[in-house]
Image: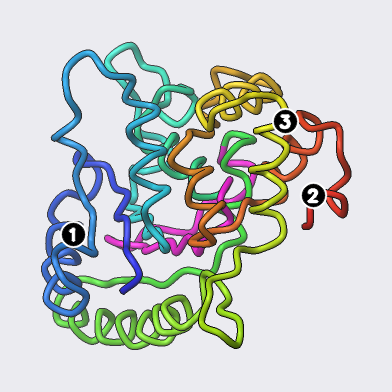
Amino acid sequence: MARIFISYRRDDSAADSGRIYDRLEPKFGRNNVFKDVDTILLGVDFRHVLTDEVAKCDVMLVIIGRQWVNMADESGQRRLDNPNDFVRIEIEAALARDIPVIPLLVEGAQMPQESDLPHSLALLAYRNGIAIRSDPYFHRDMDLLIGRMDVLMAKISDKPSVIPDEMGAIILPKFSMNIISESLERGWSMERLAEEMNKQVRYMNSGWYITAPQIQLWIIGITRPSEYWIEKMCIVFDKSADELGF
């Protein structure tokens, strides 16, 4: 079963997010719907934890209330403009992976325009979303969302992550084998490869990070790197996308 990550702001849409989760959890299973990051351990880099959690998911739901775009912190700075903002990091990680990112508009919120968003979130403005209205329309809208997600999740679950040959042996995608061979040639672990790729990120405080677990998901064929990370890998290995098997 594909996994769902729910991104939301407590101060903006906690009640709506809870109701949405309560409808999704019985349908898709508790282990397949991730909503909170309260379990982040003290002393760890929360940016890496968030990107790791997003790496485990196949679909992100971004719950957007009326204050989502302009909500500010205690100093008056808009939260979306802070590179270390939890919500920003979550969405950046999902967009970087190029997984389905579905805006859910609650409390009559409007879809953000590209000009409303920091550059790293600009693509969110073009993701097709759906309005989840309050009662008496809430369950009707959720039924529509769940019906559309059923189709999406079935396509994701049915997509083969690896290809068996006639004898049943597992054949990894060509790019997976090339990532492994190029890394071994340099004596790099997956942690070292992630470090080298992150050095190619233009704005290191943007929240865009790749981690070893994400690379491992690429290698075993569970996910595929986005064009953004393919470009960084080409730079690191000094190879073209065709040479790496993309």
Which comes before the other along the chain, label 2 or label 1?
1
For the residue carrying disc 2, how many other residues have a C-alpha within 10 Å: few (<14), some (14-19), or many (20+)?
some
Judged by depth in the image, the label closer to the viewer, 3 or 1, is 3
Q: Which residues are magenta?
A: 96-117
Depicted 79 relative to depicted 20: above or below? above
- Mark 2 vs mark 1: give the one in front: 2
Residue 46 falls inside the magenta stretch = no
Front residue of 79 and 101 = 101
* Amino acid type assigned to the residue bearing label 1 in the image: Asp
Q: Amino acid at mark 2?
A: Leu
Image quadrant in which the N terminus is located: bottom left
* Residue 148 placement: quadrant: bottom left
Q: Earlier in the sequence, mark 3 or mark 1?
A: 1
Q: Quadrant of residue 208?
A: top right
Q: CA distance from mark 3 to mark 1?
A: 51 Å
Label 3 with label 1: CB-CB less than 8 Å:
no
Q: Residues within 10 Å of mark 3 (few under 14, many from 20)?
A: few
Q: Quadrant of the C terminus?
A: bottom right
Q: Is residue 107 above or below residue 79?
A: below
In 3D space, how far apart are the residues under numbered discs 2 and 1 (Cα atoms)?
Answer: 44 Å
Residue marked by disc 1: 16
| Label 3 SS | helix
Neighbours of disc 1 within 10 Å: few (<14), some (14-19), many (20+): many
Spatial CA span between label 3 and label 2 = 14 Å
Residue 185's tag is 3
Judge whether 54 appears above or below 151 on screen: above
Q: Give coordinates of residue 199: x percent, y percent.
A: 66, 19
On the rendered structure, is 5 left or right of 40? right
Q: Which residue is mark 2?
A: 244
